[in-house]
């Protein structure tokens, strides 16, 4: 599946890293198990009484694993989002039955930095796919090591158990471009903190503006 993403990125050319302009048919979706909410007043929802100040957990994992919403939810299949052209914010504020994921919260608890997170995820994932080849590590028997996607560690939040793999630049040209881009970015950062010296010129934190601003 990663090679399909690489093919889409390659249409952008090999001489420069992926940018937001090359997002096109590429998608990135992540999952998170749950998020907490506290009721501000007594509520009755589907015959259930929720008392004021009760702590409620939205089980995002249960929603994401619902086969009615996502057929074969445990199968890694980015193509399920191929025709989804909405941003994370547009999806989160639209029809909830068609929402792609609930990672960034819901309702009044929607993450305020959702658009920054989406751009950051796109840059990170797309540039890794553009610049490197990923392959399984080789075992003692000379064969490729297989990985179990259900081998997770953690508690209320989980992550894959650490594993090894082989990561190599796709070509000498991409390696040189990566080094050049890394050097250019390092010039924008403070040496000690690693934080921006100043906001980069032209940085677009959000392209969305409300149709009506309440006074």
Image: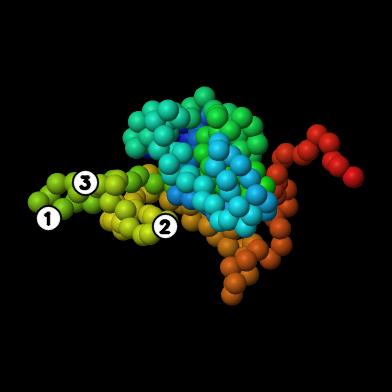
Q: Position of residue 169 (x, y in %)?
A: 38, 49
| Rendered residue at 33%/58% (across/down) | 153
Up the image or down, 19 lies above or below 179; here it is above
Q: Is residue 32 visible?
A: no
Using the rendered view, name the quadrant where residue 119 is placed: top right
Secondary structure under the numbered disc 2 in the rendered image: loop
User: Does 135 appear above or below 67?
Assistant: below
Q: Nearer the viewer, mark 2 or mark 3?
A: 2
Closer to us: 211 or 8:
211
Residue tagged by mark 3?
Answer: 146
Residue named by callout 2: 156
* Residue in front for this viewpoint, 143 or 66: 66
C-alpha gap between disc 2 and disc 3: 26 Å
Mark 1, residue position: 140
Q: Quadrant of the N terminus?
A: top left
Query: In terms of secondary structure, where does tag 3 sit?
Result: loop
Residues at marks 2 and 1, CA–CA distance in whole angstroms = 35 Å
Task: Answer yes or no: is residue 40 visible.
Answer: yes
Mark number for residue 108? none
Mark whose residue sits in front, 1 or 3 = 3
Image coordinates of residue 49 in percent, x first then y, are 57, 46
Q: Residue at 73% x, 48% y: name it.
A: 202
Q: Earlier in the sequence, mark 2 or mark 3?
A: 3
How much space separates mark 1 and mark 3, taking CA atoms? Answer: 13 Å
| Earlier sequence position, callout 2 versus callout 1 | 1
Asked if the residue at tag 3 contacts the one at tag 2, i.e. Cβ–Cβ closer than 8 Å, the answer is no
């Amino acid at each position: 599946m990663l090679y399909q993403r690489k093919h889409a990125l390659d249409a952008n050319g090999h001489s420069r890293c992926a940018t937001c302009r090359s997002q096109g048919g590429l998608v990135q979706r992540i999952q998170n198990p749950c998020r907490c909410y506290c009721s501000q007043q007594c509520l009755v929802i589907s015959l259930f009484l929720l008392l004021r100040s009760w702590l409620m957990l939205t089980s995002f994992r249960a929603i994401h694993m619902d086969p009615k919403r996502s057929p074969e939810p445990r199968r890694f299949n980015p193509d399920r989002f191929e025709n989804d052209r909405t941003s994370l914010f547009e999806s989160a504020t639209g029809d909830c039955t068609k929402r792609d994921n609930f990672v960034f919260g819901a309702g009044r608890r929607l993450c305020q930095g959702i658009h920054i997170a989406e751009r950051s995820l796109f840059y990170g994932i797309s540039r890794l796919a553009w610049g490197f080849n990923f392959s399984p590590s080789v075992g003692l028997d000379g064969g490729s090591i297989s990985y179990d996607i259900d081998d997770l560690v953690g508690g209320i939040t989980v992550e894959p158990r650490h594993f090894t793999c082989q990561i190599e630049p796709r070509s000498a040209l991409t390696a040189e471009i990566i080094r050049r881009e890394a050097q250019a970015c390092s010039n924008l950062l403070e040496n000690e903190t690693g934080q921006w010296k100043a906001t980069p010129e032209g940085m677009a934190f959000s392209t969305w503006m409300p149709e009506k601003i309440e006074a």
